[in-house]
Image: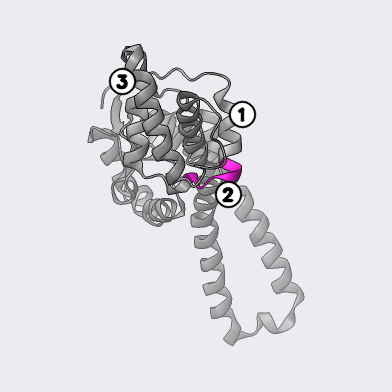
Amino acid sequence: MKFLNRVKSRTPESVELEFVLAGLGNRTYALIIDYLIWSSILIVILIVWAFLVTQIAWLRSEPIRLWITAIQLLILFGVYIGYFICFETLWRGQTPGKRYVKIRVIREDGRNVGIQQSILRSLLRPIDDILCLGFLFILFSAQEKRLGDWVAGTILIQEGQTVTKQKIEISPAATDVANRIIETGKIAALTPDQFATIRKYLYRYPALAPTARNSVSDRLANQLLERIELADTLPTIDAHLMIEAIYLAYQQQFRE
């Protein structure tokens, strides 16, 4: 494992990103914080549970005790797994520990983790933790993945350390148009390939000859407006500005 190890990723929109991996030290620090919080939550739940058991007489009967033990184990497992699933899903790949240390779980293609990835990571966490497999996998794998990361297709990165390989300049006026498109258009109808075409156009636009800019912009803008069903709604806006706005709208709709 290298110091400040980096990994490159390509999104479905053909955007090449480079991430700085979280590293074993940051991951351990975040995990300690999460375990302290998790333990506190579990202690409160068990205290409440113990109080209920002592106050309700029929719960103390011999036939019920085995069920009580089984329920306690389910609570333990549920809190352990549910803690990471809930936070990673709702906080875009972060738990309180990860947020404090400023690291984040993402998919291999650079997108946010979903509930499916969080469930897979969490279900395999006991194996990674108890058998120390996670430590070995992180230490000796190029992408610093534990077993749960391999199965879920995720990586842990340092927040704010993403490098985009292509720079695109967007005019400020495109933001307002993008908001209108999100409200009235069907931006989700655009495919990743079409978004990649938009990116390629915007990246190459400054190098286009002045005579070619208008024709290319008009043709692409008309195609995109028909795709998102706004061909008759926003006809007076400059074609290049429209393409910039559609680009921003798509990014906001499927933000990382």
- Colour mode? one colour
- The vertical placement of 135 against 166, above or below, is below
Q: Disc 3 and disc 2: Cα gap in Å?
A: 31 Å
Q: What's the amino acid at mark 3?
A: Phe
Residue occupied by mark 1: 176
Q: Quadrant of the N terminus?
A: top left
Q: Position of residue 89 (x, y in %)?
A: 51, 48
Considering only order in the chain, which callout, 3 or 1, is on the residue closer to the N terminus? 3
Residue at 49 percent of width and 42 percent of height: 231
Q: Nearer the viewer, residue 123 or 189?
A: 189
Residue farthest bottom in this picture:
63
Q: Dot 3: what SS?
A: loop
Q: Disc 1 and disc 2: Cα gap in Å?
A: 47 Å
Considering only order in the chain, which callout, 2 or 1, is on the residue closer to the N terminus? 2
Q: Is residue 145 left or right of residue 103?
A: left
Residue occupied by mark 3: 3
Classify residue 127 by image quadrant.
Answer: bottom left
Q: What's the amino acid at mark 2?
A: Ser
Q: Position of residue 44 (x, y in %)?
A: 67, 55
Q: Position of residue 158 (x, y in %)?
A: 43, 27
Classify residue 64 by image quadrant.
Answer: bottom right
Magenta segment boundaries in residue numbering? 182-187
Tell me the tag on residue 185: none
Residue at 36 percent of width and 54 percent of height: 124
Tell me the tag on residue 39: 2
